[in-house]
Image (cartoon, grey):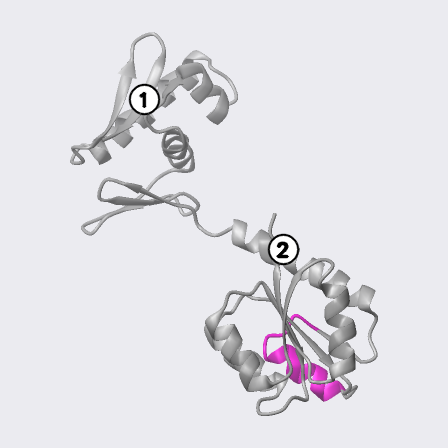
Amino acid sequence: MSKKRILYVEDDETLAFLTADNLEQYFEVIHSNNGAAAFKLFCEQEFDLCVLDIMLPDMDGFEIATEIRKRDTEIPIIFLSAKTMKDDRIKGLKLGADDYLVKPYSIEELILKIEIFLNRSQKKSEKVVTKYILGSFEFEFENYILKNNSKQITLTEREASLLKLFLDNSNTVLKREKILTSLWGNDDYFSGRSLDVFISRIRKILKEEPNVRIENIPRIGFKLVID
């Protein structure tokens, strides 16, 4: 697994060397000692987290954070500063920083905070709406929405789960029992009848899509075919 990329901005040469040396054991660190140059790096490259000193030449940490937030509202930002004033902490957090460490700080604490915010960021990214393309339709599973240029249809939770199961296994035969146990938790008669109703409704929605169809596989189950 590739290391997470950290943009580390610090103009104190000794502190920067010591901090980067420790961080590089766990992360890929791109260091800059100049605010304007650091922001240019952010615009040109991909990063997973930013660690920003506040007092910097050309562009201070608050200015960098302001510009970063105009472009990316999610990337974690940690401020490092010798300033202990409450107003500075509040200003940093209001600008969208996730945390604020006062110098001299513990390297162990910094690493721990980076790991915490990277984990949170990863969880957020995992919640991004999953979108599938189905002929002319776009399917947003988390929102239960199936839409194209002319209409938008809101599915029930069970219908959305059924369609997702088909899409995750497109062009593959799904046994009826597997579908029922996956979505209903059992394969009894009433669940089976419900499944038939949901499949009929999805087929009706997709009937205008010539390259998409749900086929019956006699005595076995169904198959979503996408040509």
Residue farthest top in this picture: 219
Which label sits on residue 223? 1
**Which residue does the numbered mark 2 point to in the structure image?**
3
Give the quarter of the figure containing the C terminus. top left
Mark in the foreground, 1 or 2: 2
Q: Considering depth in this image, is 69 or 219 the residue closer to the camera?
A: 69
Q: Crowdedness of circle 2 by 10 Å Cα count: few (<14), some, many (20+)?
A: few
The reply, left or right, for residue 204 in relation to residue 22 is left
* Of residues 209 and 67, the one drawn nearer to the viewer in this rendering: 67
- The kind of residue tagged 2 is Lys
Residue at position x 74%, y 83% from top? 13
Badge 1: residue crowd in 10 Å (few <14, some 14–19, many ≥20): many
**Residue 170 location in percent, x, y?**
34, 29
Towards the viewer: 164 or 180: 164
Secondary element type, mark 2: loop
Q: Are marks 1 and 2 in contact (CB under 8 Å)?
A: no
Q: Would you say residue 94 sits in the magenta stretch?
A: yes
In the picture, residue 28 is in which quadrant?
bottom right
- Residue 87 image-quadrant placement: bottom right
Q: Which residue is at 71% across, 82% downward? A: 89
172 drawn magenta = no
Describe the element under mark 1 as helix, strand or loop: strand
